[in-house]
Image (tube, helix red, strand yellow):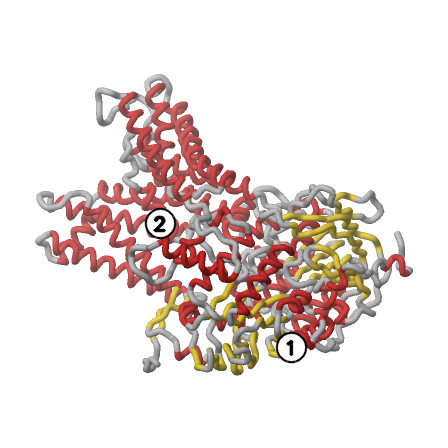
Amino acid sequence: MKADAKREPALRLVKRDSISPARAVIVRAVAIIAALLVCGIFFITVTDSSIIEIYSAMVSGTFRNSITINTFFREACMLLIIAIGLAPAFKMSFWNVGGQGQVLAGGMAAAMWLFYLGNKLPNAAILPLMFVSAAIGGGIWAIIPAVFRVKFSTNETLFTLMMNYIAIQLVKYLRISWSPIHALGMIQRKSGSLPALFGNADGLIYVIAAVGVVLMYIYMNKTKQGYEISVVGEAPNTARYAGISELKVILRTAFLSGAVCGIAGFLYVSAIDHTISETMGGGYGFTAVIVAWLAKFNPIFMTLISMLISFVRSGSSEIVSRNTTTLDSSIANINIGIFLFFMLGCEFFLNYKVVFRGRKDAKK
Amino acid sequence: MKDEIAVRLNGITKRFGSVTANDGVTMDVRRGEVLALLGENGSGKTTLMNMLSGIYFPDEGTIEINGVPASIRSPKDAFDLGIGMIHQHFKLVDVFTAAENIVLGLPGKSSLNMRAVKEKIRAISEKYGFLIDPDRKVYNMSVSEKQTLEIVKVLYRGADILILDEPTAVLTPQETERLFAVIRNMRADGKSIIIITHKLHEVMEISDRVAILRHGQYITTLETKDADERTLAEAMVGEKLSLNIERPKPEGLVRRLEVSELSCVNAEGVPTLRGVSFTAYGGEILGIAGISGCGQKELLESIAGLEQTVTGSSVLYYPDGGEPEQLIGKTPREIRSLGVALSFVPEDRLGMGLVGSMGMTDNMMLKSYESGAPVFLHKREPQQLAESVRDSLGVVTPSVTTPVRRLSGGNVQKVLVGREIAEAPTVLMTAYAVRGLDINTSYAIYNLLNEQKKKGVAVIYVGEDIDVLLELCDRILILCGGAVSGIVDASTATKEEIGLYMTKIGGAESGTSGGDPAMKGGDKK
């Protein structure tokens, strides 16, 4: 290997075979601390606060009282539900970036019942209908690109992305046609709202998120279908060789992925927004892509990352609310962006090692 | 001019991990000559040429171009030295025209004078006799046109030393003639041409000298006019080595597979299998020899139901005491459930048959995961199987859950072969089962196959090493260009005989000296 050394560049990257868990934790912790520092510096430049004020505001914005704590958990749960929806598709190397559209499709399907039968049916009847049709709606939104991928080898990343915009336009149209007079909060109906659990209006969201994480973990790791997903995603030739029908697995998994996102849409309509709007979900369909990916589909990591992002979000809103004259709500997105940058950036260092050349040889 | 040395390689060595692809190769190429580079698969021809064209850098040794020591670190360095390589797999942009592909990547002003470019292309074409339309898009081109374009591209950049990696593999005889005419014109113009090929008659026809590599080592260079096909074949395959592989006498032969008129066509419409017919018997090992890409993969895959076959193909499977079953038209799963197992070790080992991110246990259940109660996976049996394969074959792995991609190549192969054997098949097909394995592991695999043979399994062994085929197998079927060029009795056949069949010369007289064991007193059923 001596001949190699002669032409070795000053700095090169070596792919790591594996990294010890302890080291991986350290790399990630460093990334989070660096992200917090950059966030703090960013706020110092846009506000008059000191760095301590900024961090304490972020913490108090999240944990000040039961309302802020509740919001924090609710947002984390919604992000988590969408992420567990995307995870099986990603595991299958089906790059579903259409979570947003699938949430909206599910939301539309749920809101449809609310609009037409919200005053006529009792909760016990309308909620299951909303739930099931939201799942089907989201599933259909995801299975369309899957059919085209399987039949015509279209690129599912672009296709699912485009489906988002179709969903957005459809929601705009439905808002106007269902409720031309009220621009906001249009669909107020007697039934169709998710009941409170233990006195908490969002209680059922927590339950659904927790159950969803456990079920998805079991599905992906312990079932035959989950096994098929891994084989098709990792080694399509091996799947063919083993006689696994790629077509069936891709369509089924895409539907499941969309259906879980659709259920998130149902929760927005029935528990959070009580209406439908194209901004529903606040872009979580995209944020969830990163959550699922960063966590490598590990449910515990997905939960932690969702909570981290929710924390940055609520903390940022708190700082914004203290500086309403100079800042607006998009600051939260900037901060989430900073965090994701560092989280994704550290993935690079987990996979590669930077090697410096020992000593520079004079070039011939 | 004729005797000037264009390229001199001095003690070139290249290693990939523990594998030595080239071992101290010293040879030269003269100006204005066609040098054929001849060698079996894996003899290091392409690796050696890749070092000339800047894709690899030698671990040891030096290269001189036109008498000047050169350090070729990148394809660009190679171009600057006037070296151009035409690879087996073309490197062209489909949606560009011929002219656009040619100027792609060349330095120059930001505005392109396409007219001047086309003028130059026309001049080159006329000079050497190429047929090329500069405005034709690559996706509209035939394989031969693409190859012409690759050659023109290299000439356009001013190459004096051209390397062609198996250029005739994809051509029809007429196209080959045209290519040879062009090569002769280039030679007349003083260019040096190195042509990598397996086809002996082409070597005789086109080359001035032949350099022979074997197992990464340079053997000799012969003047073509002093050589004949037999001496070349002998130099290529070398002396017969005694490997002392056990070969139990085949007993109780039972007809298992009867393949007749099996033909396949690839996506480009080129036939990959042409009317292959043979019979495989339980209790014997049928070897399949041939230069790589002569239809071995397609043959095994079409028996396993993974490949689309041409109408008229037939693969009959004879179960114990039952009516023969037609395998063509059955799904891979149906064929497997009849007891026909395929263990194919592809170039990248993991690509087909295993899932790299999964451990041994999960890989063991690849074909059986559907059995048992529905919905949930049952990991107990696969885990026991994984442990028994690990222990009986000596697979070195931290645990049966360690992703198999972390295992060494030999261990990966043991996992693959171990799983297929564990299915207790009646027909076991393996391809390249010992590819890249060390001696001891290879013998472990041979023993496994022999055990299967003794159990009465019909073993079909696609191999690369003729010495191994001769000692391990009972009969050897030789494929050449997708057709059976001969079936020989392995106990009497010679290495040269097989070498000749592999390069087609024996094809015409359809040698079947060891044709059908049943005819020689095997148990007929």
Q: Type of residue at label 1?
A: Glu
Q: How many marks?
A: 2
Residue B377 screen position, x and y as percent: 57, 48
Which quadrant of the view contains residue A263? top left
Residue B446 screen position, x and y as percent: 72, 68
Taking the image as shown, residue B490 lies to the left or right of residue A352, namely right
In the image, B286 versus B359, the foreground residue is: B286
What residue is drawn where x is 55% and y is 40%? A248
User: Alpha-carbon neighbours of circle 2 within 10 Å: few (<14), some, or many (≥20)?
Assistant: many
User: Would you place residue A134 above or below residue A318 in this image?
Assistant: above
Kindly state the secondary structure of the residue where label 2 is placed.
helix
Q: Type of residue at label 2?
A: Val
Q: Are marks 2 and 1 on the same chain?
A: no
Label 2 resides on the chain identified as A
Residue A318 screen position, x and y as percent: 17, 46
Label 1 resides on the chain identified as B
Residue B78 screen position, x and y as percent: 44, 71
**Any part of residue B455 in sight:** no
In the image, B383 versus B420, the foreground residue is: B420
What residue is drawn where x is 36% and y is 40%? A161
CA separation in Å, label 2 and label 1: 66 Å
Kindly state the secondary structure of the residue where label 1 is placed.
strand
Taking the image as shown, residue B204 lies to the left or right of residue A221, namely right
User: Alpha-carbon neighbours of circle 1 within 10 Å: few (<14), some, or many (≥20)?
Assistant: few
Residue A291: mark in rendering? 2
Residue B223: mark in rendering? 1
